[in-house]
Image (cartoon, grey):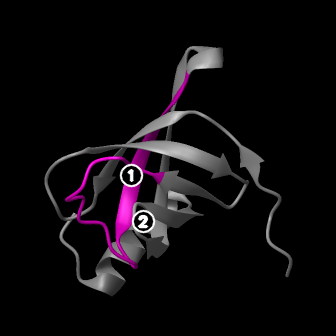
Amino acid sequence: MEPAPRHPTKEMASVEIYGRNGQMIMSVRNMSSSGACLEWKHDGYEIRQGDLIRMTIVLKSLNRKHHVNAEVMWRDGNRTGVSFIASNRVLDRLLEKGVAA
């Protein structure tokens, strides 16, 4: 299966990791129908491959917010790639990982 086409973006996202407190603000570098690449400037963000996250993406051009769930697939320095997860699958994924929601 070929990867979904990526589209560059300059949107911002608030990211929460399931099972942990706090929010991180990240730039959405590019996005597709199946995932996104996120980047941040602040050191100390504790995001790891396999983390399940909830993102709130601010769509300035539409004056809306969009909420999506995702799993961290990779991390390289201050960038990470995520794969979107359907809302009805989040609880199953959390239970599989043993994370308290």
Secondary structure beneath disc 2? helix
Mark 1 vs mark 2, foreground winner is 1
> What residue lies at 59% left-to-right and 47% top-to-bottom?
29
Whole-angstrom CA distance, mark 1 to mark 2, is 10 Å
Q: Quadrant of residue 2?
A: bottom right
Q: Which residues are magenta?
A: 39-59
Is 89 in front, or is 7? 7
Q: Residue under circle 2?
A: 90
Residue 36 horizontal side relative to residue 51, left or right: right
The extreme left residue here reads: 21
* Rendered position, 46 above or below 62: below
Q: Any mark on residue 54, and which?
A: 1
Q: Position of residue 77 (x, y in %)?
A: 40, 68
Q: Position of residue 89 (x, y in %)?
A: 49, 68
* Rendered position, 24 above or below 43: above
Q: Amino acid at mark 2?
A: Val
Rate crowding at label 1 as few (under 14), some (14 to 19) or many (20 or more) other CA atoms within 10 Å: many
* Rendered position, 1 above or below 6: below
Q: Position of residue 56 (x, y in %)?
A: 43, 38
Q: Any mark on residue 4, and which?
A: none
Instruction: Say if the magenta span includes residue 44.
Output: yes
Secondary structure beneath disc 1? strand
Q: Quadrant of residue 51?
A: bottom left
Q: Amino acid at mark 1?
A: Arg
Residue 20 horizontal side relative to residue 64, left or right: left
Q: How many marks?
A: 2
